[in-house]
Image (spheres, helix red, strand yellow):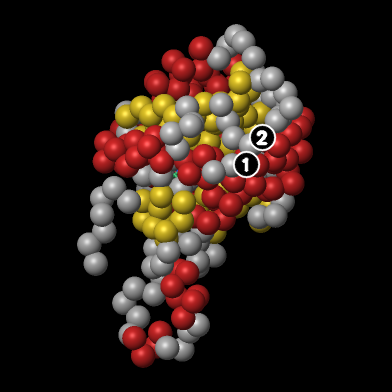
């Protein structure tokens, strides 16, 4: 079956991510509904507005399908509402919604949300979200804005400078899906030879090149060369580095929750950081319903 380019085809774990996001946004907007702040939602890697859950049953013989509950099979193949729709459907919404996507076909589908939700103030920008959000964040340095930025890249596309710009406003909380298992740790090859463009992406994502000395053990050999060996707990060290750096920017950082694929492999981590205790309490409540990460290797 040919998949449409503009649909996000995601694993069934997408539901966990989107349900967690929705629960957080619901708690946040409920808590602030009597305040006079202008509430802003930023979705930096917004996608197409909907994601089709990857059909785990594709390729299975019809006969075998009869073994399973019909409704369950249908549910596995359904569309889930993507992050923009989850935010737009909230009971107590935001005053402004900023959606970004670098893919023009996906951004085109996002534009349909404007006619679907004519009463909402929706702003869509096509392109690399990093410079666009860094510029936008400067506008929020003054005034009575409060907001949440959902940062959900597939790979190392979220630049540290963007997280810094949002933290500097002291008004935004960030929810980051940190794609450690599905992308970042895979780019850090066992052999230690990393293409220059990957190295550059990783430096921008962490905002430092410290990741490299954390994940490789370099030992001189008898010939005076260096033997490079990737450490076994590289993923845990990288998560620790990222969280330590978030703690340097925000007063509050929640304990992350891990999201696994259907084979039990950790694919990404849901992280929350923000300037206020209230958001931290909501985030802790939501994230503890997922699988909490036990003390990542931090501060080494
Ligand atoms: C994981 S998907 C987003 C899914 C969406 N947040 C949801 O939950 O429904 C990541 C999206 O980021 C977009 N993307 C990749 N690099 C980007 C960049 N530098 N700036 C903005 N969007 C980017 C991709 O086109 C893709 O739609």
Residue at horizontal 50 percent and vertical 82 percent from the top: 69
Q: Taking 244 as reference, is 205 left or right?
A: left
Quadrant assignment, res 31: top right
Is disc 2 surrounded by few (<14), some (14 to 19) or many (20+) residues within 10 Å?
some
Q: Would residue 216 be visible to someone looking at this image? A: no
User: According to the image, label 1 marks what residue?
Assistant: 91
Above/below status of 22 relative to 169: below
Front-most of residues 120 and 252 = 120
- Would you say 78 lies left or right of 94 here? left
141 in relation to 284, above or below: above
Q: In the rendering, at what x and y percent does residue 283 appear?
A: 69, 41
Horizontal and vertical percent position of residue 206? 50, 31
Residue 63 rendering spot, x and y as whole percentages: 36, 90
SS at badge 1: loop
In the structure shown, which secondary structural element does the residue marked by tag 2 occupy?
A: helix
* Circle 2/circle 1 CB separation < 8 Å: yes
Quadrant of the picture in which ligand 1 is shown: top left
Q: Residue at x 34, y 73 (%)?
A: 58
Query: Which residue does the numbered mark 2 point to in the structure image?
Result: 29
Left or right of 219: which side holds 237? right
């Amino acid at each position: 079956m040919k998949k449409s380019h503009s649909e996000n085809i995601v694993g069934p774990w997408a539901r966990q991510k989107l349900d967690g996001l929705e629960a957080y946004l619901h708690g946040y907007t409920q808590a602030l509904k009597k305040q006079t702040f202008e509430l802003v939602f930023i979705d930096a890697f917004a996608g197409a507005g909907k994601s089709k859950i990857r059909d785990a049953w594709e390729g299975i013989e019809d006969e075998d399908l009869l073994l399973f509950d019909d409704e369950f099979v249908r549910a596995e193949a359904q569309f889930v509402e993507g992050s923009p729709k989850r935010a737009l459907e909230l009971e107590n919404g935001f005053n402004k919604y900023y959606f970004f996507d670098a893919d023009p076909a996906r951004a085109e589908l996002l534009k349909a949300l404007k006619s679907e939700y004519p009463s909402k103030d929706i702003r869509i920008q096509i392109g690399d979200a990093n410079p666009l959000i860094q510029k936008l964040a400067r506008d929020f340095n003054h005034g009575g804005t409060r907001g949440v930025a959902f940062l959900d890249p597939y790979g190392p596309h979220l630049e540290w400078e963007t997280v810094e710009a949002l933290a500097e406003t002291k008004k935004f909380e960030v929810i980051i899906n940190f794609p450690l298992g599905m992308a970042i740790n895979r780019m850090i090859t066992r052999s230690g030879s990393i293409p220059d463009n990957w190295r550059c992406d990783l430096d921008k994502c962490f905002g430092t090149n410290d990741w490299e000395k954390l994940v490789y053990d370099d030992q001189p050999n008898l010939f005076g060369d260096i033997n490079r060996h990737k450490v076994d707990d590289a993923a845990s060290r990288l998560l620790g580095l990222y969280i330590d750096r978030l703690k340097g920017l925000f007063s509050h950082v929640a304990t992350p929750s891990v999201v696994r694929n259907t084979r039990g492999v950790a694919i990404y981590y849901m992280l929350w950081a923000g300037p206020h205790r209230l958001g931290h309490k909501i985030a802790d409540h939501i994230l503890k319903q997922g699988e909490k990460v036990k003390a990542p290797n931090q501060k080494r």
